[in-house]
Amino acid sequence: MTDPRARLGAIFGLGVLVLCLEGALPLALLAAGPTLAVLLHPRTAGWRLRFLGGVALLAWTTALSQGLFWADWPRTPLLVLSTDPNIVISREGVTHGLVQSLRFVALTAAGVWVALTTAPDRLVAALLAVRVPFGIALMGATALRFVPLVGAELWAVREARARRGRPAWARSPWAWLRLEVSLLRPVVARALRRARALAESLETRGFHPTAPRAVREPLRMNAGDIVGLGVVATIVTAAVFARGLYGLYGAELYYTPALRPLYAFVRAWM
Amino acid sequence: MIALAAAGYRYPAGTAVGPVDLRVAPGELVLLTGPTGCGKSTVLRLAAGILQRHGHGVVTGAVTLGDRDPASLIAADRVRTLGFVGQDPDDAVVAATCAAEIAFGAESAGWAPDRIEARVTTLLHRLGLAARADRAPSALSGGQRQRLVIGAALVAGAGALLLDEPLSQLDPEGAHAVMALLRELADDGVAVLCVEHRLEIAMPYAHRTLLMDAGRIVADPVSDAGALRARGLAGPMVRELEERTGGTRWRVRADTVTHASVASDVSLRSASSRPISGVIHAANLSFAWPGEPRCVTDVSLDIQAGERVALVGANGAGKSTLLGLVAGRLRPARGAVRATGRVVEVPQNPDLALFCETVHAELAYGPVEARRSPADVAATVARAAAALSVADLLHRPPQALSRGQRLRTAVAAALACAPRLLVMDEPTSGQDRDQVDRMLAALPDALPGGAVLFASHDLDVVLRHATRVIVLDAGRIVADGPPLATLLAAETRGLPLPLPPLARVCAALGVPYAAPEQLAAWLEAE
C-alpha cells in the first residue's frame, strides 16, 4: 500500500479486527505482521533491539499484572507466590493480559510502521482527506517528526552530563531521581524554542488551522491500494459478522445448525 | 517597501526597543547589525507583524509592508506579502522533502496544483537544489538548507524578505552563496532586511548597513568601520585598515601575494608522524554514520598542552564527528583515542549542556560529582564564573539567559570540571565579535596545562585565537599547521575556505594575522 489514506484505512480495519479477536494465538499472529514489518525497516540493530524489548516488556508487564490482579472466576493458579495471604498468578489473568497487550502491540506496531514509511506531509494530506482539520493534522504529523529529534536531544544531554562527571550511584534514590528528571529541563526548553521558531515559520508562510488549502500533489490510490483496502475491508466485515453471530448464539438470541462450523471456527480461532 | 516609523516594542518585563525609523526600498538589500541583545530580532519581528499579533508587550509607531500593515494581513495574504527566515533553518522546516517544503507557502496561498508545481520547479532550479527535490531537507548542507528556507519563504512572490542571522551556521562558501542569492533577489526587486553579525562576508553584498545599539538605530548607513568596532563588531577589516592608514599604499604588495610562497612550509599530511605525547593522541580514527558513506577516515592527531587547535572545513567535512570521536561521545569504527586527562565537550547547541536549576549549580556540578571539598567547589565556581563573565548570573536559571550568556555558562561549567582538553563545536555561532573575543581570550588562563580544540566557520576568529589549524576535507586531514600559512595552503589547494581579505594582506606583508589597528600601527612604524 503506497497511498497514506489506504494505510490509515488499514490501521482502522486492524483496530476493528483486534476487537473481534479474543484468542491469544490469533492476536499474536496478527501482531506479528506489523511487528515484523517494523523490524524489516532499515534501522540500526540497536533501534530494532529497543523496539523488540519494548514490545516484550509491554506484553510481560501486562500479562503479569493481570495474572496477579485477576478478580473473575474461574481462577486457575499458575504460580503460587504466597499462601497466607493467598497471592497467586492465575492462568486466566495472564491470558487476559496477554490478549490486551497483543491488541496494543498490533496497533502500535502498525502505527510505527506507518510513521516510519510515510512522509509527514503525505500523512497530513491523508488526514485532510478524511476530514481531519488541517491544524490538528499538521500538529500530529509535526509531533511525529520531532519524536526522534527529542530522543536524540535527551541522549545528547545525558552525554553532555556524563562528560562533566557521571552521577554517583551512592547518592539517595530521591536525589538520583531528581537528577534524572533534570535532564528533561534542557530538552523542554529547546522544544519550546523550536516550537516558537516553527510557529513563526508557519505564521509567516500563511498557515491557518482552518483556512482552506491547496495541495501540490493530490493523493491518488493505485490498483494495489484499492485491492489491499478491499481485502482488509472483506476480512474485517467477515470477522465482525462472525463475532456478531457467535455473540447472538452465546446470548441464546439466535441459533441455526447451519452455522455450527462458523461457531466452531470462532471458538477455536477468534 | 519595508517601513518602520517610530516603531517600538516594550516587553512585559520592561525592556524597550525603539523608537526605530527604517525604510528598505524594493531592490535594496539592507543589513541590520549591532551588539548581541540590542533589539535587532525584535525589530525584525515587528516588521513581520509577529509581535503585534502574538506579543504580550506594547507596540508603538507604525509598520508597513508595501502599503499594508503586516499585523492585519490574513493568513493567505501574509505569504504573498512577506517572507521571514529565522535563525535556525532546521526549526523552520515543516515538510519531509525539499519540494514539499517550498510548496507549503503556495499551498497556503491556495494556488492550483499545476501552478504550485511550476513555481516549485523554477525555485528549485534557481536555488541550485533541482537534483535534491525529493530529498529530506535534513540531508542538505547548511548552506543549501538556508537557501531552501529562503526559497520557501518567497514561493508566493513576497516583495519583502526578513532574515535573522542567516549566515550564523554556515561555512564561508555557504555564507557567500546565501549572500549572493539575497543580492540576486534584491536585484529582482525584493526589499531585503537582514540581521547579521558576520559583516566581513555580508557587507560587500549589501546596499546599506544599519547599526543598532540599545534598542535604537545609531547609524544609517554605517560609514566607518570604527563605529562597528566601538560596539564590539567586526566590519570589513581591510576597509578599516584603509581608514586607519589613510590610504592603500600597502595594497600593491597585498595584491601580488602568491599563496604558494607563503604556504610552502606547511605540511599537508595526516598527522601520524607527530610524537606520542601531550594532552591527547588519536590514531587512525575512522567512523561512519549508519547508512552513510564514511564520515571520518583514517584521522590521526596529537594535541599538546597549551595549544588552541581550530578545526576548519566546509559543512559536512566531518568536523563535529571528529570532535565527538576525540571527546569520546562517538566510538570509532577503527582507531583509538588516548587522553592523558579529562576531556569535556561543549556541544554545538550549548543549551543541551545546561540541565541544572541555576548557573551556580551548573558550574558546581562537575566539582561536586568529583567529590571535591565544599571550599574547593566554591573556589572553582568563582574562578570559572569570573573567567567567563557569568559571576553576576550565578543565581539565575540558565535556560532563561540570552544565547551568548548560555554559551558562556556552558563553557564555564565545562571549565569547572578542570578538563585537560576542552572541546567546543562552533562556539562563535550567533555571537558578536566582542563576546567571542572575551570568551576565547579567557580560555588560556582558565585552563592551565590544558588545551582547546574547537571547530569554527569563522576564519577571522580562528586566525586570531588559534595557535594551530587543522583543515578537514571529506573526513580527512588535508592540512595541519600554523593558522595563516595553513589556511593559505588550503585555499591554494582549492578548498572552499575563502580567507578573510585581511589575512591575505598580512600574508603579503609577512606579518602574523593581526587586528586592523595593530596592522595600521605596524605599517605606520614601517
Image: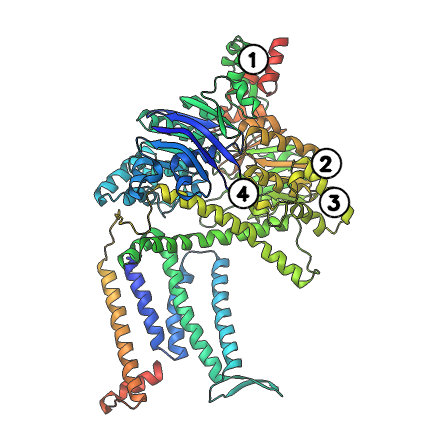
Q: Tag on residue B449?
A: 2
Which label was assigned to residue B244?
1
Q: Nearer the viewer, residue B348 or B261?
A: B348
Residue A23 position, x and y percent, is 39, 80
State the image coordinates of residue B172 (x, y, percent, origin top left).
47, 29
**Which residue is at a point 51% across and 24% down the rendered structure image?**
B499
Residues behind callouts 2 and 3 on a single chain: yes
Q: Residue at x 34, y 55 (%)?
A: A137
Q: Amino acid at mark 2?
A: Gly
Q: Chain of mark 2?
A: B
Which quadrant holds residue B98? top left
| Location of mark 4 (residue) | B349
Task: Name the amino acid, label 1.
Answer: Arg
Packing grade of label 2 (10 A; few <14, some 14-19, many >=20) is some
**Quadrant of the rendering where the C terminus of chain B is positioned:** top right
Query: What residue is shown with label 3?
Result: B378
Q: Nearer the viewer, mark 2 or mark 3?
A: 3
Tag of residue B31: none
> Which numbered mark, 2 or 4, is in the foreground of this view?
4
Quick one: label 3, few (<14), some, or many (20+) residues within 10 Å?
Answer: some
Q: Are marks 2 and 3 in contact (CB under 8 Å)?
A: no
User: Which amino acid lies under the numbered mark 3 shown in the image of this protein?
Assistant: Ala
Residue under disc 1 on the same chain as residue under disc 3:
yes
